Image (cartoon, coloured by chain):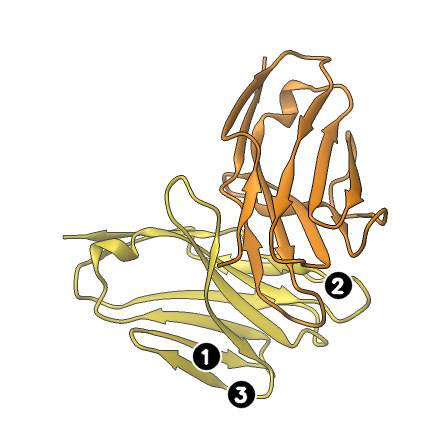
Amino acid sequence: DVKVTQSSRYLVKRTGEKVFLECVQDMDHENMFWYRQDPGLGLRLIYFSYDVKMKEKGDIPEGYSVSREKKERFSLILESASTNQTSMYLCASEKGGRGTEAFFGQGTRLTVV
Amino acid sequence: GENVEQHPSTLSVQEGDSAVIKCTYSDSASNYFPWYKQELGKGPQLIIDIRSNVGEKKDQRIAVTLNKTAKHFSLHITETQPEDSAVYFCAAFDQTGANNLFFGTGTRLTVIP
């Protein structure tokens, strides 16, 4: 089974802190994604990556950055956390190519106080 | 880019009844339409998908229909069971250059025993 693992289930951070959310997948997938999930808004794409050291902005990249130094690991960085970044964050990976199944991690619920 | 609308946002049915969730999309180039189920405390998981060269696909109690002319697709769950209670997301794959999924806003399905 494909496994996508997010490093934390719950995080509480203070406003202004730099926050790292880590995601690791074990199936050698090319594509990795970070989504944000909020009630009534569904899943919104923050950043994605098709290859090591490659990144592309999604629909809501402001206030975030990402890092992909190794194929299996994709990190989301909140440079200076703000209360409006309190949300559920979901990482996903895909094998690549046109229209393939996305595998999601269990999510990280981040609260910024 | 693609815009996916999903209705209803919440749906309650009696156990054994059918449930229908509807989505519309805007980009006629989209050709892959997956449905994801998110159980409490977990990440979304693919339950069924359909490609634009077919109009209907079934997998046991779950079926998806696609009308490319009208740009809408629907999820049908028959003989609902309490374990069907979850949030369901539709998605459309955009072929116009951005290799990622566009998600609907989700439907919270509650099956009442």
Which residue does the numbered mark 2 point to in the structure image?
Answer: B99
Q: Which chain is orange?
A: A
Disc 2 marks which amino acid? Asn
Q: Between residues A70 and B70, which one lies in front from this camera angle?
A: A70
Disc 3 marks which amino acid? Val
Which label was assigned to residue B65?
Answer: 1
Separation of marks 3 and 2 at Cα, in angstroms: 22 Å
Separation of marks 1 and 2 at Cα, in angstroms: 23 Å
Across and down, in percent, residue B52 comes to 60, 82
- The mark closer to the camera, 1 or 3, is 3
**Chain that bears disc 2:** B
Residue at the image position 70 percent from the left and 76 percent from the top: B28
Q: Are marks 3 and 2 in contact (CB under 8 Å)?
A: no
Which residue does the numbered mark 3 point to in the structure image?
Answer: B54
Disc 1 marks which amino acid? Thr
Q: Earlier in the sequence, mark 1 or mark 3?
A: 3
Residue at the image position 49 percent from the left and 42 percent from the top: A106
Q: Earlier in the sequence, mark 1 or mark 2?
A: 1
Question: For the residue carrying disc 2, how many other residues have a C-alpha within 10 Å: few (<14), some (14-19), or many (20+)?
Answer: some
Q: Secondary structure at mark 2?
A: loop
Q: Earlier in the sequence, mark 3 or mark 2?
A: 3
- The mark closer to the camera, 3 or 2, is 2
Q: Secondary structure at mark 3?
A: loop
The C terminus of chain A - image quarter? top right
Question: For the residue carrying disc 3, how many other residues have a C-alpha within 10 Å: few (<14), some (14-19), or many (20+)?
Answer: few
Separation of marks 1 and 3 at Cα, in angstroms: 9 Å
Name above or below for residue B50 compared with residue A50.
Answer: below
Task: Give the color of chain B as drawn.
Answer: yellow
**Chain that bears disc 3:** B
Across and down, in percent, residue B113 comes to 14, 52
